[in-house]
Amino acid sequence: MLTDVKMRALLADPPTTRMELPDGSIPGLFLRVGPTRHPTWTFRYVVKGASGTTSRGTKLAGRKFYRLTLGIYPYVSLREARAKAALMIADAEQGINPATEIERQAEADTSSIYTINMLADAYMETHVTPRLKSERTAKWVFKEFIRPKWGDRSPEGITKQEVTKELDRLLSRKSKAAAIETRKWLSSMLNWAVDSGRIQFNPLIGIKAPARFTARERVLSMAEARAVWAVAGEMGYPSGTLVQLLMLTACRLREIASVQTSWVDTVNSCIVVPGKSYKTGDLTVVALVPRALDILNNLPKHEDGDFLISSTNGYRPLYTVTPSALKKLKDDSQKRLGRVMDHWTLHDLRRTVATHMARLSVDEILIERVLGHRIGGVRAVYNRYRYLEEKRAALALWTVELLPSSGPDGGSRYEAANDDRPWVQGSLFQAGFEA
């Protein structure tokens, strides 16, 4: 029998292939799960009388199976899915097809002509894509928060109370940023739908935006960063390796997690990230210090796909560190450090690298280039390797700080002064340490 505990485990570690899990309590109720991380409730049923009646007028059970989608877990809870399915079973037992009834109600209510999914498709195509630079953010917010919650709903049927409740849930379980972006894009789409005559009113009018979130400022100290690095090394592949590469490259989690064999340029010691896989949409070249290249060169060989960091033999990337692995990383880092560490996230590692490079006198513009930010809103794409050595030098300077006892790639800056490789000497010269 399905339980919330089992389903939360599926959310944390979804199967690699699609499966249908029977509820075990309500006949015909299934949870369809797969690698998309959006488990969906489905209900299969037969309608009594669909196969006719006996000579005495008794309705025969139908032979045709119908299927309805009841929503996405956890937005539709186990209790709600069971309640919906139970009502539909009662209708089907009386010869009423739930699907036909839903269609009849939709036809009677002209406001149901459009669903949130239908509006979102039109909104993206006619308004966001041709006019706004934030298309990638909009697509992500709709995919992660809006479509799963309200996709099959009529906009006029959505109440202020349920939107406020969902925003509160995001504030408590996700982040202020998620709540703010959800309200922003949902309200913007509904205003557009009113202006274009698709719906009569915006049900979100009057809902205040969540308080503006304060950008995170958490930066790990060098002692904290070294503890995390050491523990990640002990954890090994794949989670520990992913964390170490984040610390050596200052990349975003998804960019490193998605690395494929063809992206790694061993001749020029870099990762070439296609624009479709990078946040800005631009092709980006990530410089690799020798330690990072050594890690990539010694990863396990996969047979089922090209993703280098994977728990499925290369078939799918390891898009994130599991909650249990992240907890172990944090707990063991605190033990190694000998004190409690303030809350930090994997994305804080990127900020940590940037902050310490600034402390080491790396030029601000060069730090922006290491982080893959657009400089002045424009990035040169005609020479993908431009600034590669400068970026490598900046990361090398950080690396010798991070790894205080491992030689030229990560020894003290004074030890590294005897290393004649250009990327090491360039870093030391910039920081004022001459050989």
Image (cartoon, rainbow, N blue to C red):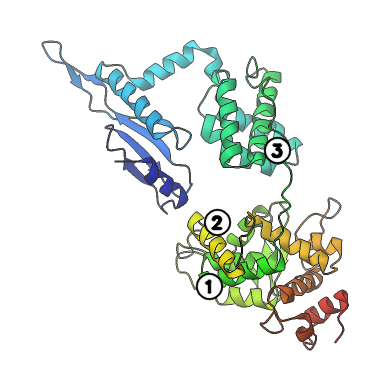
- Please state which amino acid type lies under the numbered disc 3: Thr
> Alpha-carbon neighbours of circle 3 within 10 Å: few (<14), some, or many (≥20)?
some
- Please state which amino acid type lies under the numbered disc 1: Glu
> In front: mark 3 or mark 1?
1
Please indicate, yes or no, whether residue 191 appears anywhere in the rendered image.
yes
- Local SS, label 3: helix
What quarter of the picture does the N terminus occupy? top left
> Alpha-carbon neighbours of circle 1 within 10 Å: few (<14), some, or many (≥20)?
few
Mark sitting on residue 320 = 2
Seen in the picture, residue 404 relative to 146 is either above or below; the reply is below
Mark sitting on residue 234 = 1
Asked where in the image residue 3 lies, by quadrant, the reply is top left
> Alpha-carbon neighbours of circle 2 within 10 Å: few (<14), some, or many (≥20)?
some
Seen in the picture, residue 192 relative to 77 is either above or below; the reply is above
Disc 1 + disc 2, Cβ < 8 Å: no
Cα distance between the residues tagged 3 and 1 = 45 Å
- Across and down, in percent, residue 39 comes to 44, 41
Decide which of tag 1 and tag 2 comes sooner along the chain: 1
> For this rendering, which residue is in front, 246 or 344?
344
Mark sitting on residue 129 = 3
> In front: mark 3 or mark 2?
2
> For this rendering, which residue is in front, 171 or 136?
171
Cα distance between the residues tagged 3 and 2 = 28 Å
Asked where in the image residue 308 lies, by quadrant, the reply is bottom right
Disc 3 + disc 1, Cβ < 8 Å: no
- Local SS, label 1: helix
**Left or right position of 145 against 51:** right
Decide which of tag 3 and tag 2 comes sooner along the chain: 3
